[in-house]
């Protein structure tokens, strides 16, 4: 910027400040003196003076710029012509840019086609991975839901049978009580008859007194038996009410499971971990951390949108667990729900903790489950069902053997498709085995590898 420009800016600023100061003082004096111009009110007159002052500032600024800057005068007076020239230059620039873009478009077309081919290949590979992952997730979720449903329905049926038994026992007790009551009434009547005979026959007083005492003892015994039966009846009635409530709860649980509203089911593992206590205080710290993980899992499952403490457990259970796991051995500690909870249920989640030694269940290479199939006689649906049955059998075997983690991890999942395709080409029966790919502990998970065996020889591996 030149010295003339700086001087021009300084003059404009000083002139504007001076005019603003004069206008402010003039407006203040007009306001204080309550002067009136053109029959206006004093307040309106002060506003008019302020407006005129601002107009004067703008006019003086424009005048100084016009007088001092030739460039500014030319730009203001010839604005239309300059704008037209700029538009012409812009059109020329657009034409040149269009030619350049056409050249760049031809160059990038080949690169775009190459990138599209690479992208399509990557998308196909990614889609295959997602399909395999979604298939395994769906199988796991369906297996878990079906197992919970079968367990709940079995508990409901057992409770219904127990309720029927209790109802039958209650009816029998009612009948016995009625019989005892009738016998008691009869004894009372007999006692009254004996007392009347005593009044008539003084000579038989001693014998009749003994008879009365005997009848009284019998009545007392009957009263005691009736009282005991009454207590049994009350206990059975209470048990029947509890069983009825449990049956209704099982029914609600089944309905919640089928409707999909159940967020946390009874005995669900909210958090777990393998713990070995090697220093003082380590057991309590580990248990507190597992309870924090369980609290976050419960809040996330219930979709509560809060961060406070919702998991509740008696302190006596925590102290007992701390004493159990403080011997320096490896333990699998799990925090499980005591009851069922639905989505959005804003209440405390009661849990319990159990710990089991984390021992070796399967060694690497152990056969977990096996199944013989004839690929030439199976449809694609039946073939897939056979593989799923093998996974289910492996999961069941692992659970019976002591693996508390129900998840099954399949080694080389992406090669499972080619493994199945190669199996379907064999015209003779083949034994498919699910073998442990590494040492499996109680804490799991069970990692398996599928192998195909024929005549005692491994002919195909899923990871091969």
Image: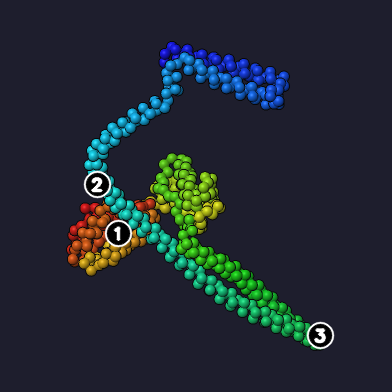
Pick the front one: 437 or 359: 437
Of marks 2 and 1, which one's residue comes earlier in the chain? 2
Please tell me whether mark 2 or mark 1 is closer to you in this view.
2
Circle 1 sits in a helix, a strand or a loop, which is it?
strand
Q: Residue at 70% across / 81% down in the picture? A: 185
Residue at numbered disc 3: 199
Q: Residue at 31% across / 64% down in the picture? A: 385
Q: How is the model colour-coded?
A: rainbow
Residue 43 found in image quarter: top right
Q: Residue at 46% across / 51% down in the picture? A: 270
Badge 1: how crowded within 10 Å, few (<14), some, or many (20+)?
A: many
Q: Residue at 50% across / 14% down in the picture? A: 10
Residue at numbered disc 1: 368
Residue at numbered disc 2: 117
Circle 2 sits in a helix, a strand or a loop, which is it?
helix
**Residue 235 point in image, percent of width and height:** 60, 68
Give the side of residue 23 with respect to residue 12, left or right: right
How far apart, in angstroms, are the residues tagged by discs 3 and 1?
90 Å
Please tell me whether mark 3 or mark 1 is closer to you in this view.
1
**Residue 279 point in image, percent of width and height:** 43, 40
Pick the front one: 274 or 350: 350
Residue 289 visible in the displayed image: yes
How far apart, in angstroms, are the residues tagged by discs 2 and 1?
43 Å
Give the side of residue 209 with respect to residue 447, left or right: right
Residue 365 visible in the displayed image: no
Please tell me whether mark 2 or mark 3 is closer to you in this view.
2
């Amino acid at each position: 910027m030149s010295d003339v420009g700086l001087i021009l800016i300084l003059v404009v600023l000083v002139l504007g400040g001076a005019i603003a100061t004069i206008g402010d003082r003039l407006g203040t004096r007009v306001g204080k003196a309550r002067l009136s111009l053109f029959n206006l009110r004093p307040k309106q007159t002060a506003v008019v003076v302020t407006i005129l002052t601002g107009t004067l500032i703008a006019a003086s600024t424009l005048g100084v710029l016009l007088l001092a800057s030739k460039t500014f005068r030319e730009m203001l007076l010839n604005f239309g012509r300059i704008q037209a020239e700029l538009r012409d230059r812009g059109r020329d620039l657009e034409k040149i840019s269009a030619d350049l873009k056409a050249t760049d478009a031809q160059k990038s077309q080949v690169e775009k086609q190459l990138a599209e081919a690479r992208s399509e290949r990557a998308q196909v590979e990614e889609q295959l991975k997602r399909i395999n992952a979604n298939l395994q997730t769906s199988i796991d979720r369906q297996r878990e839901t079906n197992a919970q449903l079968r367990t709940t329905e079995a508990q409901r049926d057992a409770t219904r049978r127990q309720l029927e038994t209790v109802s039958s026992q209650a009816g029998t007790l009612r009948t016995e009580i009625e019989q005892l009551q009738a016998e008691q009434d009869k004894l009372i009547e007999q006692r009254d008859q004996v007392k009347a005979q005593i009044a008539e026959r003084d000579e038989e007083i001693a014998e009749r007194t003994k008879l009365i005492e005997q009848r009284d003892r019998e009545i007392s015994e009957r009263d005691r038996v009736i009282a005991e039966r009454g207590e049994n009846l009350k206990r059975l009635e209470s048990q029947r009410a509890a069983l009825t409530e449990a049956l209704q709860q099982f029914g609600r649980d089944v309905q919640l499971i089928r409707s999909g509203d159940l967020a946390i089911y009874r005995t669900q593992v909210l958090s777990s971990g393998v713990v070995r206590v090697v220093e003082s205080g380590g057991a309590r710290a580990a248990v507190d951390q597992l309870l924090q993980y369980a609290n976050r899992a419960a809040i996330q499952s219930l979709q509560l949108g809060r961060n406070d403490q919702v998991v509740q457990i008696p302190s006596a259970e925590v102290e007992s667990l701390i004493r159990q796991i403080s011997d320096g051995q490896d333990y699998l500690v799990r925090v499980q729900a005591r009851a069922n909870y639905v989505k959005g249920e804003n209440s405390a989640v009661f849990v319990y903790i159990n710990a089991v030694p984390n021992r070796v269940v399967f060694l690497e290479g152990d056969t977990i489950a096996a199944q013989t199939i004839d690929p030439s006689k199976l449809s694609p649906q039946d073939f897939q069902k056979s593989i799923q049955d093998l996974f289910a059998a492996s999961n069941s075997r692992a659970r019976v053997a002591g693996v508390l983690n129900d998840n099954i991890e399949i080694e080389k999942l992406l090669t499972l498709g080619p493994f199945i395709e190669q199996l379907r080409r064999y015209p003779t029966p083949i034994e498919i085995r699910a073998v442990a790919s590494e040492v499996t502990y109680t804490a799991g998970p069970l990692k398996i590898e599928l192998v195909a065996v024929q005549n005692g020889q491994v002919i195909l591996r899923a990871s091969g």
